[in-house]
Amino acid sequence: MCGICGILNFNGQPVNPETIKSMAGMLSHRGPDEEGFFISNPHSSSQSKIGLGFRRLSIIDLANGHQPMQYQELTLVFNGEIYNFKELKKECVNLEHTFLTQSDTEVLLHLFSEINEKALEKLNGMFAFALWNNKTNELLLARDRIGIKPLYYFLDSKKIVFSSELKSLLACGQVPFELDSRALQDFFSFRFVPAPYTLLKNVRKLIPGHFLTFKEGKIKDQAYWNLNAALDPLKKDEETFENELFDLLNESVKLQMQSDVPLGAFLSGGVDSSLITALMVKNSAKKIKTFSIGFEKGTGVDESKYARTVAKILGTEHHELFLTENDLAQAEKYLSKMNEPVADPTILPTALLSRFAREEVKVTLTGEGGDELFAGYNRYKALLLSEWILKSPKFFQKPFSFIAKKFGKGQAFQTIPWITPLNWFDLNQDFSSEIIESLFENSESSQKNSGYLKMLTPSLLNHQNPQLLNEILKLESSTALPERLLMKVDMASMSESLEARPPYLDHRIVELAWKIPSSQKIKFFKGKYILRKIATRFLPRSIAWRKKHGFILPLAHWVRSFKKDFIQTSLEDSIFDSNPIFNKKTIQNLKNSMSQTQSDEQIALAWPMIVLSLWSKSLKKS
């Protein structure tokens, strides 16, 4: 796991090596083990001049694998892991390629020398990389299919600047800091900004499953992977799907356990992480180290006892970390480290757990993706129930809807039976559109401008689509999964120089998941039905089928009990006071009300403000 950055000038201007070093320096936490640079010949006749920077977290082939790495006319800086690199290496050896290292980076170079961008279709892994062809003066940027690893870029008529992190991008001194009001509305609505947008008006995130090419100042954006073909469900029975999924999960875990450094697992005690841990134990001759987090009694949902039970059943070497309200004191430190603002408060415990695990291991496997692929959240049940009610006779619809609203838990049940992809936007907002729009001057409708809604397709707008649940899951896996959940884990783990790998997000598992019909994801009103069946092969039913609680941080309790003025001090001299985008009157009223009372709702609204404020302040210090 590493950090990459670079500048490509189109106008013949040489790249300043000191600028690249400054950008790479901002990525030191992603790669504390070594650094490397490549600067093209400033005296060459080519109009294209490039500089590449690299920071390394050594995981595979510790003695070698130095970057930037070169082969023939190609130079590569690579962040991530290619899990099937040994298989791909054999293909290259059969074509008479000779290798100098045992690294996946070298395999990628040789593969590109043979088949160019077609190599992307062969990769199984998580990655973001930049490849420079010195012969054709062409730069290629690529991001993995799911968006596990981030990559940002800024483009104007003279240059392209790119990096693994926004702060590194800004460190070049050539990227303007200008907030995007449309992206800000998405940030306050969903706590993240969907790709390709960022909070900065002229900076973009590379879309997952895409690659960009730059040649002679011209840009081309292409997709090398999408899920459209996978959305047609296969006609297979439940047992066949279960066995296929088990085989793929088992292979994914084996591949992702490849490491030349100590490796462990995050274990929450839920079915997702418990199943991953069970497969690790199955495929390891050594005792697996597991790490879990809990909360002081009375401060939130504490599931540590379930993790402890699973660890005992599987025989892992288990480590527990318990958080108290005093840990909120570290919030400013970790929020200031954020690469891109993501207003998910669970980033704090995730970062603290990463720091805790880093004392023992350098790599962890995680359970991210299980809920999004196999319908683990309560709102998905509401969607299926809504569809069922609308298909029932009309005289049943009203009483069925009344019962669903009375006994269903969560906002989604309150809109039954009229749950559609359009009002799915409202269901996923933490606050109403009116509240969001009141924060801004001259604000247009957040729905009209939302980058989230731009992801809607004709099939999603068809409420009678028999695979609507899978379409909704695809929508969320293209937005909230990479840009909120995976971004949060990447920032939290990399802030502590820990590599986090999610076996569920092997692209073959993702493709299979969307071919599995909804009826095998939610059955008997149980989400992740097919995963739970697989889990019963290793774990007692009390674990495999227990109710999902989720990772709930007692944020409001911590804020009120630990530091009464936490909100106020965080928002002092903030970006809200200096930027004309924001409605000063609304912001001041919010500050005044929160200085007197701090209800759960007020703290929930204050949190994205705190995140944005501390992030912007950290930019001034860096």
Image (tube, rainbow, N blue to C red):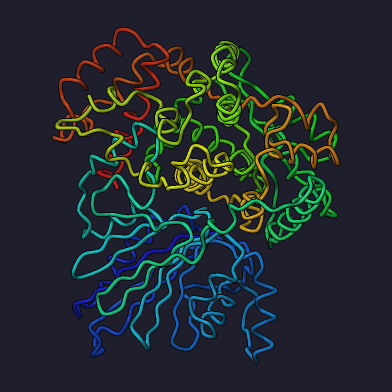
The residue lying toward the viewer, choosing from 225 and 14, is: 225
Near-viewer residue (55 or 605): 605
Is residue 617 depicted above or below 438 in this figure?
A: below
Q: Residue at x 49, y 72 (%)?
A: 67
Question: Does residue 333 show up?
Answer: no
Taking the spot 40% from the left edge, 28% from the top edge, the residue there is: 426
Q: Position of residue 378 (x, y in %)?
A: 59, 27
Give the vertical position of 302 relative to 594 (above or below): below
Image quadrant assignment for residue 298: top right
Q: Is residue 501 visible?
A: yes
Residue 348, placed above or below residue 486: above
Q: Is residue 430 left or right of residue 180?
A: right
The residue at the point 53 percent across, 73 percent down is: 66
**Residue 369, image x and y in percent?**
60, 44
- In the image, 319: left or right of 347? right
Q: How many labels, in total? A: 0
Rendered residue at 49%/37% (across/down): 463
Q: Relative to 579, is 115 on the left or the right?
A: right
